């Protein structure tokens, strides 16, 4: 038999932090490959052995145990029959001696992934292929950004043409390139921000950093230096730079760093009265800005309560607080309007964007700033400069990618297509609500949703079941919710198929969970 782990290349990125890290993840992947090769009986025996060990209490530290991943793997091997035990042990020896990657992965437990990266080799439309040739549907649209789909030659050609002219040039002082200026004009005209000015950086976290500094600097410039507090919401995500980590509402992302930025606070994520009470208690004269995702994304795809956004906007207006809307995820058609602010009828003082503006073809993000907030630094009689800038600010090739992306969105009517597919996706996901493993389904606005299962351990098994059936599944929330954010080129029939795949993966995960529990209890 050929090496089981060589073609699989591991599954640890999808199950890191679930107590199924490499080499345990390699065992799990071997079982999936055996199933693909028609060796279903052998596959089932391996997976049953994994389930028995997980349920027996032999676990890694990150899910309440004390064992190393090697100790857990040894326990699994011990539970196999002689033939499979020999094969798996040999393959584990091969895996443990394989070369480690030197690439530091984002949000990753590196001991789990350093010898088992799942390498994506190419993409086309809504599909991806790994280096073994295994094809999967890109259900999360990578990290929320692949709006127009993979493999768009038009965007690549636009970037190549720009690079042949000038790849980039500094945007400091009086210098600029034409694509950056054209993109700023286009975004200012299309966005819901009055008399807009546009900052272009390298991504969403850059946009948050710029916006947080601008909010404080604005109040100093207009003679109100006491307005420094930045308010955000529980379960919010605003990137992982210094300010984003500090104001974010997912505490795991801030663990161990100490106090990065002072004068930040959070309120309940869907209770406008909590924000109003904070303003009353702290005093409007202390609060610089309120940061808000129209739909909380990474925190679990949480929709706003009715009138919530309108209410917090009113509180900001009445108390002279800068209203910042984070559309890094929801921008550029994801909710069935170009911006979610337009769908919800709000008008932010600052709108932050990234991801879908280039569909990920090149890194780019930024902020659309109202004329009022920009005025202290733009008015003809001002002697102020905003002391902020980035090496790749207004990057010419990145802007060319964005302009080409916007052309595709407009020409192909992709925003309207999102609206057309909203109901089929919602109906499909909600058909899973009755599954005994499902806690909640959140959908109903654009091509965006989440299916929350009982716990993160069960989700890890669901994700592997989806992968083996041709769907890439990623977790959000507390590692227990399926991230649904497909490219806009998804077909109606593919929605039905994806729901069937997820349903089958849920059934399989629950059956194995029950079997493992029965075995652990001696039944």
Image (cartoon, rainbow, N blue to C red):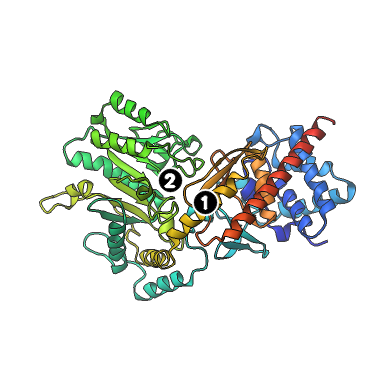
In the image, residue 404 sits, relative to residue 456, either above or below, namely below
In the image, residue 321 sits, relative to residue 394, either above or below, namely above
Q: Nearer the viewer, residue 438 or 454?
A: 438
Residue under label 2 = 239
Q: Residues within 10 Å of mark 2 (few under 14, many from 20)?
A: many
Quadrant of the image occupied by residue 155: bottom left
Task: Give me the C-alpha separation between circle 1 and circle 2.
Answer: 30 Å
Q: Secondary structure at mark 2?
A: loop
Q: Secondary structure at mark 1?
A: helix
Q: Quadrant of the N terminus?
A: bottom right
Residue shown at the point (25%, 37%) measured from the top left: 317
Q: Residues within 10 Å of mark 1 (few under 14, many from 20)?
A: some
Front label number (1 vs 2): 1
Return the residue found at the far left: 381
Residue 241 on image: x %, y %: 41, 45
Q: Which mark is residue 423?
A: 1
Q: Quadrant of the C terminus?
A: top right
Quadrant of the image occupied by residue 124: bottom right
Residue 359: in sight, yes or no? no
In the image, residue 387 sits, relative to residue 268, either above or below, namely below
């Amino acid at each position: 038999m050929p090496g089981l782990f060589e073609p699989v290349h591991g599954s640890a990125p999808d199950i890191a932090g679930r107590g199924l890290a490499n080499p345990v993840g390699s065992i799990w992947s071997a079982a999936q490959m055996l199933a693909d090769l028609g060796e279903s009986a052998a596959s089932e025996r391996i997976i049953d052995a994994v389930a028995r060990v997980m349920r027996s209490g032999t676990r890694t530290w990150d899910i309440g145990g004390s064992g190393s991943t090697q100790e857990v793997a040894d326990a699994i091997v011990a539970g196999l029959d002689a033939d499979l035990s020999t094969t798996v042990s040999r393959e584990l020896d091969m895996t443990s001696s394989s070369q480690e990657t030197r690439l530091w992965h984002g949000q990753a437990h590196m001991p789990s992934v350093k010898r088992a990266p799942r390498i994506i080799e190419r993409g086309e439309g809504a599909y991806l292929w790994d280096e073994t040739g295994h094809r999967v549907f890109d259900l999360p649209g990578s990290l929320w950004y692949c709006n127009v789909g993979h493999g768009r030659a038009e965007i690549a050609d636009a970037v190549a043409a720009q690079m042949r002219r000038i790849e980039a040039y500094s945007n400091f002082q009086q210098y600029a390139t034409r694509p950056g200026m054209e993109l700023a004009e286009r975004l200012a005209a299309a966005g819901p921000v009055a008399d807009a000015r546009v900052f272009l950086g390298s991504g969403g976290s850059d946009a948050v950093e710029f916006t947080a500094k601008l909010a404080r600097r604005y109040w100093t410039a207009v003679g109100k230096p006491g307005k420094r507090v930045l308010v955000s919401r529980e379960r919010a995500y605003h990137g992982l730079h210094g300010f984003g980590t500090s104001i974010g509402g997912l505490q795991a992302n801030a663990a161990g760093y100490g106090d990065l930025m002072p004068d930040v606070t959070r309120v309940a994520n869907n209770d406008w009265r909590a924000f109003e009470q904070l303003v009353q208690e702290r005093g409007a004269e202390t609060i610089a800005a309120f940061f808000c995702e129209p739909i909380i994304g990474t925190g679990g795809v949480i929709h706003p309560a009715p009138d919530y956004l309108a209410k917090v906007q009113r509180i900001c207006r009445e108390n002279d607080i800068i209203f910042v809307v984070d559309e890094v995820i929801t921008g550029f058609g994801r909710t069935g309007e170009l911006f979610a602010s337009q769908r919800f009828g709000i008008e932010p003082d600052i709108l932050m964007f990234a991801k879908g503006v280039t569909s990920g073809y090149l890194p780019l993000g930024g902020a659309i700033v109202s004329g009022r907030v920009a005025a202290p630094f733009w008015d003809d009689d001002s002697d102020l400069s905003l002391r902020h800038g980035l090496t790749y600010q207004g990057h010419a090739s990145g802007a060319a990618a964005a302009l080409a992306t916007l052309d595709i969105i407009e020409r192909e009517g992709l925003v309207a297509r999102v609206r057309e597919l909203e109901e089929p996706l919602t109906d499909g996901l909600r058909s899973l609500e009755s599954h005994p493993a499902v806690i909640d389904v959140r959908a109903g606005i654009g091509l965006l949703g989440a299916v929350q299962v009982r716990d993160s351990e069960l989700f890890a098994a669901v994700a592997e079941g989806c992968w083996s059936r041709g769907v890439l599944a990623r977790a959000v929330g507390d590692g227990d919710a399926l991230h649904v954010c497909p490219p806009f080129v998804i077909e109606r029939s593919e929605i039905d198929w994806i729901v069937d795949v997820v349903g089958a993966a849920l059934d399989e995960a629950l059956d194995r969970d029950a079997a493992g529990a029965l075995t652990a209890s001696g039944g």
